Amino acid sequence: MEIAERVKKISPSLTLAITAKAKAMKASGIDVVSFGAGEPNFNTPDYIIAAAKEALDKGMTKYTPVPGMEILRKAIAEKLSKELGVSYTFDQIVVSAGGKQTLRNAFETLLNPGDEVIIPSPFWLTYPELVRLSGGECVFVETDKSSDFKITPESLEKAITKKTKALIFNSPSNPTGSVYTKEEIKAIANVVEKYGIYVISDEIYEKLVYGETFSSIVSASPAMKDLTIICSGLSKSYSMTGWRVGYSAAPANVAKAMSSLQSHTTSNVNSIAQYASYVALTDKRGEDFLKEMISVFDRRRKLICSLVNSCELISCNEPKGAFYVMVDISKTFGKTFEGELISSSADFCRLLLEKSLVATVDGAAFGAPNFVRLSYAISDSDIEKGIKRIDEFLKKLK
């Protein structure tokens, strides 16, 4: 059976593949330390689990409106209005099956064949795949370690053409952990407004910020609300990755179109997960959970950066958000491990896993071939064990 060309061009998610491989090795009794995790290693809070049971007991097992239960959409609209200082109504919210579907809905709704989408690099590896699936063209804007992996108004403006339709903006960032300041966002928004392009703002890590204040580009000016689709969800903030609940906030006509699209793909999100998400957002116990999780991640962030920067040949910036760190491994290129040459980040990752039982994610998948991504959504002891193994690996290079 012949596969469609557009699907043939899709690259499987490397982060999911690395995580699956590491889990399989662990299941077979191999002591692997995996830095590939893209989800918090916290259980979903008990009060949210109890809400799901309550939904089952109440018989909330039928279809809901395609864009989501009204109580959930109202809770999301109220949350955004309160936190961002921008007024949203429930009919501007579409609840989808995770953050990926919110992005897919946004691209499918906005893009015509040949439309260009600007993607700052490094980028979450799913962005280019979704743009191409929707008929768009990717325009990458390179950033580097010295700028903390942030685009500037000048680099953004230089990338804009007559075909530019949208900018993907991700702060806090996966994979870099970079967080844009309010002033930096305002400067980016000025360029967006000047050219009238759209912004797809991925804010899935909004709650995981350390020593900084989260700012949304939609808050930069009154005009940005009509130019922005916010894509977010509860996966990271409430450790609900498996529940598959994401949401978007957009101008009413765009939200209506996204809902129509979703009505012919997945229809509504799981009703039990929706009710649990409503409780997650409205129960005060969520604040305590978030406070504790942020404190733990902040400690691990400092730990992993300190350990990485104490190693020879590798280094990293200290991220301000999410739970990832990009490690520069370029000084290992041209060296050998037990006679095997390291000429790329792929070589580094493969040898590190095979020889030292440490799983990392190849930075090339994120548009950063001189780096590997480490997740610190693992225990302190695993961080220490894993970086110790990396250090020992590096000391054996010739």
Image (cartoon, rainbow, N blue to C red):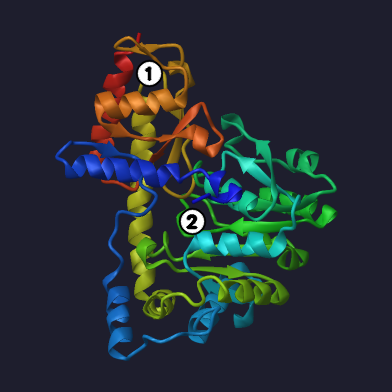
Residue sitting at x 51%, y 43%: 11
Give above or below for 85 relative to 361.
below
337 or 196: nearer the eye? 337
Res. 343 in view: yes
Horizontal side of 202 relative to 310 (left or right) equals right
Residue 122 percent coordinates (x, y): 57, 38
The residue where tag 2 is placed is 205
Return the x and y of residue 198 as percentages of the image width and height. Answer: 74, 58
Q: Is residue 240 above or below residue 369?
A: below
Q: Specify few, some or many for label 1: CA neighbours under 10 Å numbering under 14, 14-19, or 20 or more.
A: some
Task: Inspect the image, locate mark 1, and give the three-letter code of the amino acid beneath it.
Answer: Glu
Which image quadrant for residue 310? top left
Mark closest to the chain's N terminus, 2 or 1: 2
Number of labels in the image equals 2
Left or right: 220 as drawn, with respect to 193: left
Which residue is pictured at 48% across the width and 65% down the height? 233
Query: Circle 1 sits on which residue?
Result: 312
Which mark, residue 101?
none
